[in-house]
Image (cartoon, rainbow, N blue to C red):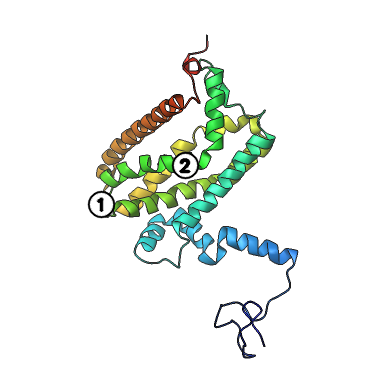
C-alpha cells in the first residue's frame, strides 16, 4: 500500500504515514465534511472551547492561572480564544456596514458635535475595529499590572489574563448584539454604550479572583485603577485624533462644534 500524500510504502496496519504523517485511509470529500473541517479549524474545538468559556464564567482564576502555570492542553490558548472573539465582532461590524448602516446612527450621540467629524470617526472605528481592540489592551493591562498584581504575574502573563477577559466579554455579549442588530438596529447605539462599563466590571472581577485581595485593599486599588484607565482611554483617543489630523484624515473644520 502507498501513502496517498508522499508515495511511501506502508504496511496494511498503518493508520498514519511515518514519513509525512498523512492518514492512510482518506475519506471522500463531502460538503458535510468540508463544513465540519471549517468549524473545527475556526473554533479549534479540539482545545476545549466550552471548558474555557464555562471556566471563565464560573472560576476565571482557574483558567488563567492554570494556563499560565502549564495547563496548556486543558484550556484554549488566549490567542485562539481572542481570535474567535474578533471574528464574531467582525461579523457584527459587517452586518452593520452592509445591511443596517441607515438604521444604526452613531452621529446621534451628541448633537453639538460636527456631523462630518462623527461620520469620519465612525468610519475609522468600523474599518479598524480589531486595531482598536489591541490598542485598548495596554490601557487595561498596564495599570492592572502596577496596582492589582498580588499574584506577581509578569507583564506578558497579565496580557494573557486580559486576552481571556476581553475575549470572554465579547463572546458573552455576541448573541445579544446579534439579536439587537438584526431585530432592533435603531437601539444598537443605546445598547452598545454601556458595554465599556460591562467590560471594566468583568475585568475587575477577574483581577479580584486571580489576586485574592481583601475587600478594602481591592476597593481603593480598583478606584485608582479605573481613574488610570479613564485617563488612558482619554489620552489614547486624543493621540489618535492628533495623528489622524496630521495624516490629513481630519481637518480643523471637522472639530468645530455644530452651530
Mark 1 or 2: the one toward you: 2
Determine which quarter of the picture holds residue 9.
bottom right
Residue on which the image places disc 2: 133
Q: Which mark is residue 150?
A: 1
Q: Position of residue 53 (x, y in %)?
A: 50, 56
Q: Position of residue 93 (x, y in %)?
A: 60, 39
Does residue 241 appear left or right of residue 259 in this picture? left
Q: Are marks 1 and 2 in contact (CB under 8 Å)?
A: no
Determine which quarter of the picture holds residue 238.
top left
- Which sits in the foreground, 226 or 138? 138
Q: Residue placed at 43% from the left, 50% from the top?
A: 163
- Let me know if residue 190 appears in the view: no
Q: Is residue 115 above or below residue 140?
A: above
Q: Residue placed at 26% from the left, 54% from the top?
A: 152
Q: Is residue 224 above or below residue 171?
A: above
Q: Position of residue 21 (x, y in %)?
A: 56, 78
The quarter of the picture where the N terminus appears is bottom right
The local crowd at label 2, few if under 14, some if 14 to 19, many if 20 or more residues have their Cα within 10 Å, is few
- Which sits in the foreground, 217 or 158? 158
The local crowd at label 1, few if under 14, some if 14 to 19, many if 20 or more residues have their Cα within 10 Å, is some
Q: Residue placed at 46% from the left, 58% from the top?
A: 55
Element class at badge 2: helix
Element class at badge 1: loop
Does residue 45 appear left or right of residue 204 in this picture? right
Amino acid at each position: 500500500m502507498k501513502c496517498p500524500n508522499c508515495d511511501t510504502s506502508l504496511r496494511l496496519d498503518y493508520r498514519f504515514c511515518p514519513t509525512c504523517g498523512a492518514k492512510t485511509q482518506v475519506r471522500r470529500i463531502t460538503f458535510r465534511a468540508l463544513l465540519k473541517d471549517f468549524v473545527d479549524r475556526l473554533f479549534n474545538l479540539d482545545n476545549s472551547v466550552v471548558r474555557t468559556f464555562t471556566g471563565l464564567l464560573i472560576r476565571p482564576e482557574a483558567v488563567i492561572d492554570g494556563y499560565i502555570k502549564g495547563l496548556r492542553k486543558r484550556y484554549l490558548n488566549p490567542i485562539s480564544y481572542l481570535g474567535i472573539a474578533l471574528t464574531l465582532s467582525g461579523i457584527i461590524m459587517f452586518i452593520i456596514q452592509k445591511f443596517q448602516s441607515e438604521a444604526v446612527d452613531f452621529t446621534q450621540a451628541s448633537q453639538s458635535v460636527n456631523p462630518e467629524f462623527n461620520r469620519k470617526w465612525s468610519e475609522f472605528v468600523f474599518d479598524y475595529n480589531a486595531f482598536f481592540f489591541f490598542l485598548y489592551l495596554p490601557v487595561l493591562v498596564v495599570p492592572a499590572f502596577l496596582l492589582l498584581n498580588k499574584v506577581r504575574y509578569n507583564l506578558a502573563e497579565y496580557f494573557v489574563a486580559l486576552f481571556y477577559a476581553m475575549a470572554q466579554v465579547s463572546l458573552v455579549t455576541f448573541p445579544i448584539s446579534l439579536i439587537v442588530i438584526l431585530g432592533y438596529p435603531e437601539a444598537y447605539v443605546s445598547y452598545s454604550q454601556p458595554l465599556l462599563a460591562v467590560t471594566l466590571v468583568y475585568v475587575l472581577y477577574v483581577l479580584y479572583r486571580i489576586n485574592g485581595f481583601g475587600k478594602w485593599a481591592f476597593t481603593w486599588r480598583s478606584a485608582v485603577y479605573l481613574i488610570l484607565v479613564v485617563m488612558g482611554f482619554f489620552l489614547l483617543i486624543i493621540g489618535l485624533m492628533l495623528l489622524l489630523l496630521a495624516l490629513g484624515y481630519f481637518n480643523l473644520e471637522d472639530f468645530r462644534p455644530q452651530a
